[in-house]
Image (tube, helix red, strand yellow):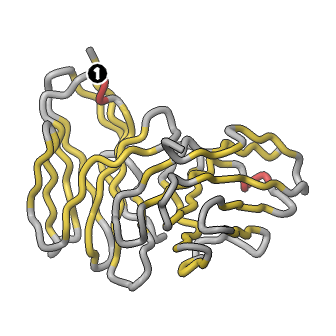
């Protein structure tokens, strides 16, 4: 399969706790992005990290990238019930075409 | 339009029939992507367009699947002789161009093949 893999597949936490999701991929990449999906429909872009970056922040989001391990993590701090959604990583590899490969996703449930 | 528009939002068809799914990208976006998502699964890449040409169509599952884009805008994904395993949500996304990195997604078409 071309897809990256994410773990855990599902995560349930209490409001106010931090949520960490991991993504592993298979090929050399130009960048890695995280997307959020509510209710199994359209995805929304959250954050992008380039292959020469190791960490990036945006509001309550923190993304890390380890290209030697071909892995990334997404941390959501001080989670809220509204963060309940599925989260996907997407990679752009260095193959020469702009084909984004998505991971299998983590279903996050934040309990109020 | 303000966002990526897909139609129909839901399509129920009988096995063996042909279906056409439509995607209207954000105005001015030259890159357009089609993905398929089966229930509870990740997104499976199908094809992407830059302008009217398709630099990568490696994800089309079989020759029953085809896609075209005309005028650098609207795209149609056609599935011929539908099978039950084609049932999925078909998602379209666009970006300013193929180098702009951020994809904007439509709400998808839920296809059910009976």
Q: Residue B4 in the image: x percent, y percent?
A: 53, 47
Q: How many marks?
A: 1
Residue, far top = A112
Q: Which residue is nearer to you in this view: A109 or B93?
A: B93
Q: Residue A28 in the image: x percent, y percent?
A: 28, 79
Quarter-wise, where is residue B83 in the image?
Answer: bottom right
Q: Decide if residue A60 is on the left or right side of residue B88.
A: left
Chain that bears disc 1: A
Residue, far bottom = A96
Which quadrant of the figure contains the C terminus of chain A?
A: top left
Residue at horizontal 28 percent and vertical 21 percent from the top: A81
Residue at horizontal 33 percent and vertical 74 percent from the top: A26
A40 shown above or below B59: above
> Label 1 neighbourhood size at 10 Å, few (<14), some (14-19), many (20+)?
some
Q: Decide if residue B91 is on the left or right side of residue A97.
A: right
User: Disc 1 marks which residue?
Assistant: A81
Q: Decide if residue B17 is on the left or right side of residue A54.
A: right
Residue at horizontal 74 percent and vertical 68 percent from the top: B65
Q: Residue B19 in the image: x percent, y percent?
A: 81, 54
Q: Which residue is nearer to you in this view: A80 or B27?
A: B27
| Secondary-structure class at tag 1 | helix
């Amino acid at each position: 399969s071309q897809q990256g893999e994410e773990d855990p597949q599902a995560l349930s936490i209490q409001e106010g706790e931090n949520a960490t999701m991991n993504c592993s991929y298979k090929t050399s990449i130009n960048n890695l992005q995280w997307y959020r999906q509510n209710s199994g429909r359209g995805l929304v872009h959250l954050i992008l990290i380039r292959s020469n970056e190791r960490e990036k922040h945006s509001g309550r989001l923190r993304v890390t990238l380890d290209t030697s391990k071909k892995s990334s993590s997404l941390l959501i701090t001080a989670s809220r019930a509204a963060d309940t959604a599925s989260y996907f990583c997407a990679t752009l590899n260095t193959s020469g075409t702009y084909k984004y490969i998505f991971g299998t996703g983590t279903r996050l449930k934040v309990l109020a | 339009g303000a966002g990526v528009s897909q139609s129909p939002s839901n399509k129920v068809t009988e096995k063996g029939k042909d279906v056409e799914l439509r995607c209207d990208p954000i105005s001015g976006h030259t890159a357009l992507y089609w993905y398929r998502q089966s229930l509870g699964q990740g997104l499976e890449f199908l094809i992407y367009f830059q302008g009217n040409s398709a630099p990568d169509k490696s994800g089309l599952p079989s020759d029953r699947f085809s896609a075209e884009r005309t005028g650098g805008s609207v795209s149609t994904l056609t599935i011929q002789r539908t099978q039950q395993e084609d049932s999925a949500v078909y998602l379209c996304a666009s970006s300013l161009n193929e180098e702009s990195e951020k994809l904007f997604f439509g709400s998808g078409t839920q296809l059910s093949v009976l």
